[in-house]
Image (spheres, rainbow, N blue to C red):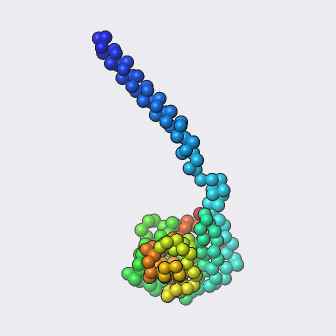
Amino acid sequence: MQSEVQVNRRDFLYVATGTTAVVGAGFASWPFIDQMKPDASTLAIATVDIDLSGIEEGMSVTVKWRGRPVFVRNRTSREIEAASATPLEELKDPIARNANLPAGSPATDLARSAGQHRENWLVMVGVCTHLGCIPLGQAGDYGGWFCPCHGSHYDTAGRIRSGPAPENLAVPMFQFLNETSVRIG
């Protein structure tokens, strides 16, 4: 009976010592974990509101969101027709890359634009998916965007058509606040 009590005391000491060590390690590592939180200035730019009233048909603006350029384009009916007429089989990347849609959605023009009643509006992160360059607007073989650094060509819906870029330009999360303003983020 004496040895059974000592075994139980020994087990208790092992568990208590281990628990104390784990709690102590947690308290010691908390400052390192806490410093990984985003800075207040980063959180402040989590969303950007854009006034669309001054962007006429055929015009684009570039805004900065989370340190990256975002292209906002009011497409012409000709650009929409060209993008809509492109068969998905001709696309290098048939995935929409739209944060507003479920993952894996097809890269139709409508899926990448602002929707059925606002398909003239296109909002995309303006960073080439090859090496992070900034593509030039209304340029290239397909009249969309062209990255001169390595020769990637995007169509009028921001879908990669030729060149080394592996994916379409990303579409960030956005929503229309009213008829003349959109919020990105």
Q: Quadrant of the C terminus?
A: bottom right
Q: Which residue lies furthest to the top in this view?
A: 2
Q: In which quarter of the image is the N terminus?
A: top left
Q: Quadrant of residue 163?
A: bottom left
Q: Which is nearer the eye, 118 or 166?
A: 166
**Residue beneath the point at 43% across and 25% down:** 16
**Residue beneath the point at 69% across and 72% down:** 51
Q: Which is nearer the eye, 148 or 129?
A: 148
Can residue 178 be seen at all in this image of the molecule? no
Residue 88 position within the rendered picture, expressed as x and y whole percent measured from the top left = 41, 80
Q: In which quarter of the image is residue 79?
A: bottom right
Residue 52 position within the rendered picture, expressed as x and y whole percent measured from the top left = 67, 75
**Residue beneath the point at 52% across and 71% down:** 132
Q: Is residue 109 above or below residue 7?
A: below
Q: Which is nearer the eye, 137 or 31?
A: 31
Residue 49 position within the rendered picture, expressed as x and y whole percent measured from the top left = 66, 67
**Residue beneath the point at 67% across and 79% down:** 55
